[in-house]
């Protein structure tokens, strides 16, 4: 009985709908002023001599509303005549933004707004634009802005003028940055991780002191990645918030929940049955090395990088990787990397949008998967990450669509460009003297991803200026081309009777020759002049004059560290050589640098460094003064910088040879409650010896050594470093320095 009732209702509904349908033989349009009758009929998508009922007419009504031309629309179908009655939205006669001095900022607002001059006005879109303007202004640090809007209608013309009068006010500054919650890591270290910085009166050029929502979001990502790389697998940045202060500034607070530290228990690779194990040997080696180490996102990325290399081979073009993670009862992690074959698709087309400044070819250079290639999800994601790593876009979005047939894919990539210029100014003060410097940098010159960098630094006796140019993917080689021009003047006429000026040019590149092995060749040319007075020694006076050198230099570096920033374990070995091509003296410089990092206990990390250099001439001549070697002040604490080794006429002239050994360890257990202080224990040993230009000068061949305690302090005026050192072995002519400090800041 019930089924019969439903059937009756269904038949009645169908018949009623059919009975209400009419054929449209004629269309009449009323109320239109600007738009023609034909245009309105075209927008409605209504056709003559076709049946229309209430359902289909409702769809046509939506079509008219979606044009945004109409405030109201009414459709009536009577006696086969369709009546369309419209009330048009006013046309925007003029749209202006006033009150903002910076033209570029005003144009940015225009670009993002929906309403434009000569478009139709809608209250809904007006409110949307107003909220958008408020959000953009706020994201740029203007939290105290005021916006007055004026709507001036012209009834006769059915038009309207829109005026936004904007008073930006002062930018909101960050007075203090703090970290709360179960953060585990000292505030000093966390402040070095994030981009935002506290506002200080001397920070005249920095824009990082202003409150910026997008920068705070970046800070959160940087903090989370740092915690995860430190082993805090379940770390969370719960939230970040600001506290408004009375002087139009804010406190920026990050709420962190670090949780426990986890280590890798087991890492396994799961393959499809028809995959050959021998092709995945490199991945299994990487997996076995990680067992027992603390969890790190960078380790996971390294493993995925090995999988990428497999995906690049023709044998496994269509694979994807998934990751299964689990926690056991002992704060350890088990990982299973599962490789699967995917459906076979090819890239038909890649569309790029949003790049108003950056050339399309600059973006395409980052593609590993290109048009015509097999679509591989792993390699496509790596391509997107390469685009993001260029640091010239604030946003990179992608969309994968079906192509012209079932085996093809169309990729849409949308980018949002960001400012790529930087201005910096810095100063330093220490027991070695003071210095000031600054620079201007552009990371996307001509939209080609070219990096330009100019810098100038001035210390007590040296002025150094440098200009460098870096062209990525030079000549489609996947290698970067680096060019630099520099000029250095060292004036010691008053104290030691000589002055040198060195003008140099270099051209080079650097690339990964094999896994973790980097080769960096460089061609350089230098023009040097040496000027002396009566205060100079007779040996230095003999070197007075002008010199020209053209050299080939290179370095081979093997880097097995677990990460570049603050490594915990692994090692880095570097060999380098400077070979003369054209020279007056034909000096050859050879050197090496070996550093080992080892986790000790209770978060202590030990660092052992061994280094050495030698300079000699191929013809048996004397090495020039500017080529002689010194040990760095940071590698031999307890002694004044450059004040060990051979002495000529009261001046420490450096040696033909230098070598050293350094051991240091972090001490996180000392005063852990002091958030802005870190301690390090160190032992330094070094030697500078050899005088090829004189048999009468003592070559000073003796090992100098010291031990002590170093302290890094984050002060209100910038990071400060103190070291208290006790020399153990030395030569009587050496100048010791038990206490040293350095302080530096940026503007």
Image (cartoon, helix red, strand yellow):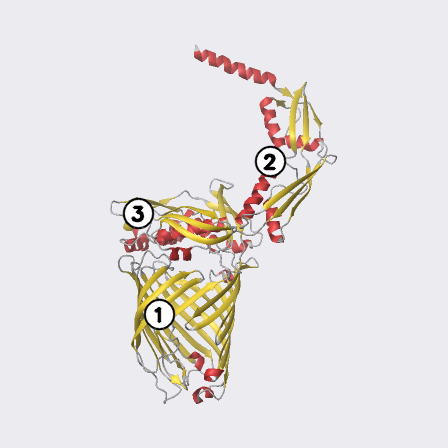
Q: Which residue is mark 3?
A: 335
The residue singled out by tag 2 in the image is 124
**Label 1 Cα neighbours within 10 Å, binned few <14 / some 14-19 / many ≥20:** some
Asked which secondary structure carries label 1, the reply is strand
Question: Is disc 3 placed on a helix, strand or loop?
Answer: strand
Pick whichever, 269 or 239, lies toward us: 239
* Left or right of 372 in this view: 83: right
Residue at the (67%, 19%) spot, across then down = 78
Q: Of marks 1 and 3, which one's residue comes earlier in the chain?
A: 3
Q: Mark 2 or 3, which is nearer the eye?
A: 2
Decide which of tag 2 and tag 1 comes sooner along the chain. 2
Crowding around mark 2 (Cα neighbors within 10 Å: few <14, some 14 to 19, many 20+) is few
Res. 707 visible in picture: yes
Q: Is residue 354 above or below residue 86?
A: below
In the picture, the disc for residue 593 is 1
Between the residue at mark 1 and the residue at mark 3, the CA separation in whole angstroms equals 36 Å
Q: From the top left corner, tell me how far across and down residue 326 is, in percent.
A: 30, 44
Rendering coords of residue 430 (x, y %) = 42, 70
Q: Nearer the viewer, mark 2 or mark 1?
A: 2
- Residue 577 picture quarter: bottom left
Residue at the front extreme, as displayed: 246
Q: Residue at x 32, y 59 (%)?
A: 568
């Amino acid at each position: 009985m019930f089924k019969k009732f439903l059937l009756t209702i269904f038949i009645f509904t169908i018949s009623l709908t059919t009975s209400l349908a009419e054929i449209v033989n004629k269309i009449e349009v009323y109320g239109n002023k600007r738009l023609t009758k034909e245009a309105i009929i075209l927008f409605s998508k209504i056709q003559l001599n076709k049946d229309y009922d209430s359902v289909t007419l409702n769809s046509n009504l939506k079509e008219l509303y979606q044009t945004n031309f109409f405030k109201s629309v009414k459709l009536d179908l009577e006696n086969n005549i369709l009546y369309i009655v419209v009330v048009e939205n006013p046309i925007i006669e003029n749209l202006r933004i006033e009150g903002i001095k910076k033209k570029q900022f005003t144009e940015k607002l225009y670009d993002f707004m929906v309403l434009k001059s000569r478009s139709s006005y809608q209250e809904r879109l007006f409110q949307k634009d107003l909220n958008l303007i408020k959000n953009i202004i706020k994201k740029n640090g203007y939290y105290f802005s005021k916006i007055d809007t004026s709507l001036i209608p012209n009834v006769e013309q059915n038009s309207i003028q829109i005026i936004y009068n904007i008073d930006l006010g002062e930018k909101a500054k960050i007075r203090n940055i703090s970290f709360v919650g179960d953060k585990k890591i000292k505030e000093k270290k966390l402040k070095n991780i994030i981009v935002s910085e506290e506002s200080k009166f001397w920070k005249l050029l920095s824009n990082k002191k202003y409150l910026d929502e997008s920068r705070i979001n970046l800070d959160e990502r940087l903090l989370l990645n740092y915690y995860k790389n430190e082993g805090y697998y379940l770390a969370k940045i719960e939230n970040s918030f600001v506290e408004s202060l009375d002087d139009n500034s804010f406190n920026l607070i990050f709420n962190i929940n670090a949780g426990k530290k986890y280590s890798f228990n087991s890492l396994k690779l799961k393959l499809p049955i028809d995959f050959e194990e021998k092709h995945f040997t490199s991945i299994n080696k990487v997996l076995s090395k990680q067992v027992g180490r603390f969890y790190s996102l960078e380790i996971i990325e390294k493993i995925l990088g090995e999988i990428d290399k497999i995906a690049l081979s023709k044998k496994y073009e269509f694979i994807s990787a998934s990751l299964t993670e689990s926690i056991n009862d002992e704060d350890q992690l088990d990982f299973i990397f599962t490789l699967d074959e995917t459906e076979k698709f090819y890239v038909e087309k890649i569309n790029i949008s949003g790049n108003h400044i950056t050339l399309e070819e600059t973006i395409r250079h980052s593609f590993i998967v290109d048009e015509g290639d097999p679509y591989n999800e792993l390699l496509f994601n790596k391509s997107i990450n390469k685009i993001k790593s260029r640091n010239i876009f604030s946003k990179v979005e992608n969309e994968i669509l079906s192509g012209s047939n079932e085996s093809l894919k169309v990729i849409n990539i949308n980018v949002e460009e960001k400012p790529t210029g930087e201005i910096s100014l810095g100063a330093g003060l220490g027991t070695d003297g003071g210095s000031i410097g600054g620079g201007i940098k552009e990371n996307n010159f001509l939209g080609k991803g070219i990096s330009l960098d100019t810098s100038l630094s001035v210390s007590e006796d040296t002025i150094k200026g440098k200009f460098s140019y870096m062209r990525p993917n030079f000549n489609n080689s996947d290698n970067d081309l680096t060019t630099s021009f520099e000029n250095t003047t060292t004036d010691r006429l008053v104290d030691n009777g000589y002055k040198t000026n060195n003008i140099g040019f270099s051209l080079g590149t650097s690339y990964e020759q094999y896994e973790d092995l980097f080769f960096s060749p460089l061609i350089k040319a230098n023009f040097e002049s040496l000027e002396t007075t009566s205060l100079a020694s007779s040996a230095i006076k003999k070197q007075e004059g002008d010199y020209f050198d053209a050299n080939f230099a290179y370095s081979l570096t093997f880097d097995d560290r677990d990460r570049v920033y603050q490594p915990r374990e692994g090692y880095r070995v570097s060999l380098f050589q400077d070979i003369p091509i054209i020279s007056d003296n034909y000096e050859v410089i050879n050197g090496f640098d070996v550093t080992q990092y080892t986790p000790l206990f209770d978060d202590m990390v030990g660092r052992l460094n061994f280094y050495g250099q030698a300079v000699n001439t191929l013809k048996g001549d004397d090495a020039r003064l500017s080529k002689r070697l010194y040990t760095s002040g940071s590698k031999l604490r307890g002694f004044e910088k450059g004040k060990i080794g051979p002495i000529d006429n009261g001046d420490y002239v450096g040696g033909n040879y230098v070598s050293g050994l350094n051991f240091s360890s972090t001490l996180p257990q000392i005063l852990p409650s002091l958030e802005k202080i870190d301690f390090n224990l160190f032992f330094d040993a070094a030697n500078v010896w050899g005088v090829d230009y004189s048999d009468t000068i003592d070559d000073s061949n003796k090992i100098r050594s010291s031990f002590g305690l170093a302290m890094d302090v984050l002060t209100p005026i910038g990071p400060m470093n103190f070291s208290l050192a006790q020399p153990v072995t030395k030569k009587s002519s050496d100048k010791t320095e038990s206490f040293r400090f350095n302080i530096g800041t940026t503007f």
